[in-house]
Amino acid sequence: MVIGIGRREFISALGSAAAAWPLAARAQQSTAPRRIGLLMAWNEDSPLVQSWLAAFRDGLGKLGWIEGRNIKLEYRWTGNDMNLMQQGAKEIVASQPDLIFSSSSPATALLLAQTRTIPIVFANIVDPVGQGFVTSLSRPGGNATGLINLEPSMAGKWVELLKEVMPHMARVAVPFNLASAPYADFYLNYFKSSAQSLSVEIIASQVADIAAFESFVAAQAREPNTGLIPMPSAFMTGHEIVAGITRNNLPAISFNRAFAEAGGLMSYGNDVSDNYRRSATFVDRILKGGKPSDLPVEVPVKFELIVNLKTAKALGLKVPQALLATADEVIE
């Protein structure tokens, strides 16, 4: 038996179905993975950076955000190429993700030039107040927040540590790449003030590329009683940096533990993996409705001193026992 349906009933049923479609679409959207755009001012093949990202994903997972299930990570890898970084910033903002993760000061500056509405979480940068990223650490006030890495006052600590291992040190060479370290002046002021109290001369120089860096290092190596401290930035983490320093037999300390692991004399700085892991908390709070403007910028809580004793012996330096006792790791 065929049951007929009148024109009025058909139109009514059609209208009910049409009204339900937007609800179904919204329900489907609500279960779609939240999207995070990551602007990475590093090389993708860096094991060190991949270990930081593993810590970030681990932090997200512990908060219930599982990649491929309820969250999607979309990367732009740029290395230290400012043109690629600018292009990556534009592409990420144009894709309108739920949140943007920034890996460096230059990347953060480029992102903020593109958007003042999409939330941005920075993981490991220098002086966000001085660079104009936030109004204050306690009340960021805009669309960016996150974690800082090293206070410029750390410059004094690096000079002191190098002086402990090299008591006759009279000069400290400080190369910096302005494109990746726009905050260089913050550090240089502390380098100069601390060096004065230790009767050490600071020789600072802007290096635009690896060739300029190697030329500077070779020139400094010809001067006696000279140590070297590379300015913290993404530029100063490449293997060419370590190779240039060790090839010229210069005692040096870096902010990055990979430096000491690769043959540099010492490293002292914050545990970047811990910063990346803690960044997940900012992502979680923002995706759940929190505002970056209300989330205070946080400081690092874990620092590491790594001493490469093998390198010290090769350089003819004796590391004080007291310093070895305080080191988090000694490479022999």
Image: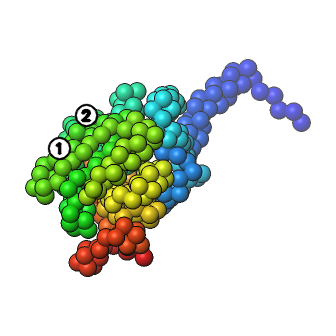
Q: Measure how far apart labels 2 and 1 are at the Cα level.
A: 19 Å
Q: Which residue occupies the extreme left position in the image?
A: 197
Task: Judge by depth and name the residue closer to the eye, 37 or 96.
Answer: 37
Question: What's the colour scheme?
Answer: rainbow
- Identity of the residue drawn at 41% across and 42% down: 215
Residue 51 placement (x, y as % from top left): 49, 59
Residue 128 visible to an observer of this rendering? no
Amino acid type at circle 2 is Gly
Q: Is residue 190 above or below residue 144?
A: below
Apparent side of residue 27 relative to residue 143 in the rendered image (left or right): right
Residue 255 placement (x, y as % from top left): 33, 56
- Identity of the residue drawn at 42% across and 76% down: 332
The numbered mark at residue 132 is: 2
Apparent side of residue 276 relative to residue 170 in the rendered image (left or right): right
Apparent side of residue 199 relative to residue 315 in the rendered image (left or right): left
- Name the residue beneath numbered marker 1: 189
- Identity of the residue drawn at 39% across and 59% down: 249
Q: Which residue occupies the extreme top position in the image?
A: 7
Image quadrant of residue 272?
Answer: bottom left
